[in-house]
Structures are given as C-alpha cells and as structure tokens.
Amino acid sequence: MRVLMPGCLLAVALVVSAYAADTVDPSSPRYAAPAIAGAPLGEKGRWVEISDKLLSSLEAAGNKIGYPGKVTGITVDPANGNVYMVVPDQGVFLSTDHAATFARADGKAISGRCETGGTLQVDPAGGRIACFMLDGTAGMTLDGGKTWSGFTGVGRGWDYASVDWSAEKPSIILAMRHESNGELYLTADAGKTWKKIAKDAKYNAVGVFDTKTFIACKSTGGIFRSTDTGATWAQVSDLTVTSHVPTIYKGTAYLISKDGLIASADQGITWTKRGAALDATFGPVFKDEKQMIVWGKKGIYESTDAGATWSLILTPPAEYGKSNPEWFNNVGWDSKADIFYVAHMGLPAYRWQR
C-alpha cells in the first residue's frame, strides 16, 4: 500500500532519534508518524537528489551520521517498488511513495554502512531483504521491513553475500568478509553463528542455490561448485566472473563475466554465455526474463532481449565517478514505475524517472 504523507508531518522529524520499535508495520499510523520529506515525483529525465532533507532532519534531531556521511546504500523491493536507503550508523530508511518521504524501518537492528553494490541483497521475488553491513550490525527482514533479525558480528563485517532465497525461512548465507584476504564465511542458522570455510582463496564472487549447493568464483578465473556445504569444491568453468553475487531468477542463475552475461539453469553445473562482453560488476535486476539491468563503472546497462544485447541507458551523477564507481555504486530499479535510484558511499542519493 502506498502511504501518502501530508506536509504537516515534516515537524515530526525531531522525534526520529526516539523511534526505536522492535516491530515496524509500514501500514500502521505508528510507522507513518516519523516520516521525513525526500523529493516528490514530477521531474523526469534527470537525476533528482532525494536524501538531503532526511539527512538534515536527522542532524537537527541530534543524530550523528557515521563515516563517510550522507548515504551509503539503496535498493528496491521488486514486489512493490518500496525504496530502502541506508544512512551510516542511522540504519535503514524506507519509502513507500517513490522517495517522496522516508522513515526509519529497521527497529534499530541495522547499523554501520554499506561498502559495495552487493551489500543489500534482495529476494528477486520481493518482500525479503538482507543487509550485509560494514562496521556495524547486519541483519535481515523477511516481511517487507515489518520485523528484522540481526546477525552476529564477525570482525568489521561484510563486502557482499548470497542468501538461500529458495527457503521459506532462509538460514544458509555465504558471505565474504571485508579486507580479510579472501575469508569466506558460512552460516546455517540465519546469522546467529558463522563458520570460516575458506581463507586466502582469492574468491571474488559467491552464490547459494540451496542448503548444500554453492558456487564461488576466483578473481584469477574459474567457477567452482560445492554440493556438500562448502566442504569440497570442483571447478566447473574457466570463465572469469566480474560480478560478485549471482541473481537467481525463476530457477536460473545469472552472473557477469568478462565475456558477458552468463546463465546456469542446473544449479551451477554448466554456464552459457549470452551476448557480448560488457563492463559491469553488479546485477542483473529483472523486470522479466527479457528485460533486465546491470551496472558498473560507466553506469547502468539495460537489455530487452534476455542479455543478447545491451545499451548504456544512464550514467550516474558526476560525483559518483570519482572513487571506485564499480565497487561503491548502488542501484535500485522500480521496474513497474520505471524509476531508477542510485547511491554511492558518502554521497547524496538520487532518483531518475524515465
């Protein structure tokens, strides 16, 4: 349900710091109360800044925004177009009205910051989102932001991770620890405990198909597969993968390689190339089997023919290109409304309505 906020509610920005509910219902008046303005829809065909009013309201209420400031992550729930935006050390803020208003929505379960475009992992079917935070508390919601569970910390935190979205209640997560020289961690109890299953392996991508079947890709080339919960691995491809987490959409897994989009319909046993090479490091995000987006250093690419061809449709705001855009840039796509959202670590967030 879309929640429309009257202008008089802007005054409640001063109570944001006191909002600490353990359970958050986006349809309830309690949830709507601390809404803070973002940017109303209306302008199309250009980047519109959507985060500064929220950040100013937080600071006015005495909340200290953590390093590196501004916004560090953004994503979209594909089921309803809701926007999730991360403010460092202030948690996850949810908009149900295309970034016109935001309210904190994590029950204070999430802290720290996003590092990469793979930090926020969304179930392609919608409704479930996991946040793999750096220098803070990671966690997950399985009901569209109403309730959240936190993960036990392991050092500074995570760069990216893959969740077993095939389960009704996901418990298996494979995660890459930040600045660990390739330490790969596994949890079988939804983040309560973690086990280190690889060290110095030079993996740059990880994926979970089910409770026992995983893949991991090496930056030097090669896709490796495990069917025994990571105890042993066998190489199944010599392709060099440039993305970091596969998207499993309607039973098919997708990764980006130096040779272009690749896909597997048999849980990673075989991989098929689709189309030509493209310069991308995250995605794909789908509208349907034919229409999808990926993103990387130059911006957002779109395919309308299942990955056979790609077009660079959006370059990010100019300041986004100054520091590791292929690593720090986050993209969310509301494919129903055809609205794109972007964030970059330490910079404002923006919206583009096509």
Image (cartoon, rainbow, N blue to C red):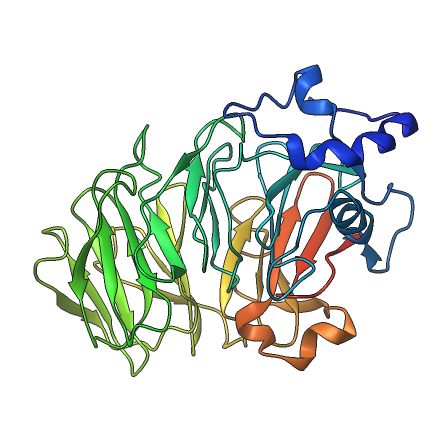
User: Is 11 placed left or right of 102 in the picture?
Assistant: right
Number of numbered labels in the structure image: 0
Residue 72 visible here: yes
**In the depicted structure, whether residue 252 falls above or below residue 244:** above
User: Is 307 placed left or right of 192 in the picture?
Assistant: right
Q: Which one is nearer the viewer's eye here, 57 or 97?
A: 57
Residue 354 visible here: no
**Residue pictured at 43% horizontal, 78% vertical:** 258
**In the depicted structure, whether residue 61 falls above or below residue 331:** above
Which image quarter is the N terminus in? top right
Which percent across, then down, holds residue 96? 70, 32
User: Is 94 placed left or right of 120 in the picture?
Assistant: right
Which percent across, then down, holds residue 334? 67, 44
Residue 328 placement: quadrant: bottom right
Q: Which one is nearer the viewer's eye here, 195 or 125?
A: 195
Which percent across, then down, holds residue 212? 16, 46
Q: Residue at the bottom extreme?
A: 220
Residue 157 placement: quadrant: bottom left
Q: Residue at the front extreme?
A: 62
User: Is 281 placed left or right of 165 in the picture?
Assistant: right
Q: Which one is nearer the viewer's eye here, 273 or 344?
A: 344
**Residue pictured at 54% horizontal, 77% vertical:** 279
Residue 313 placement: quadrant: bottom right
Which percent across, then down, holds residue 185? 24, 58
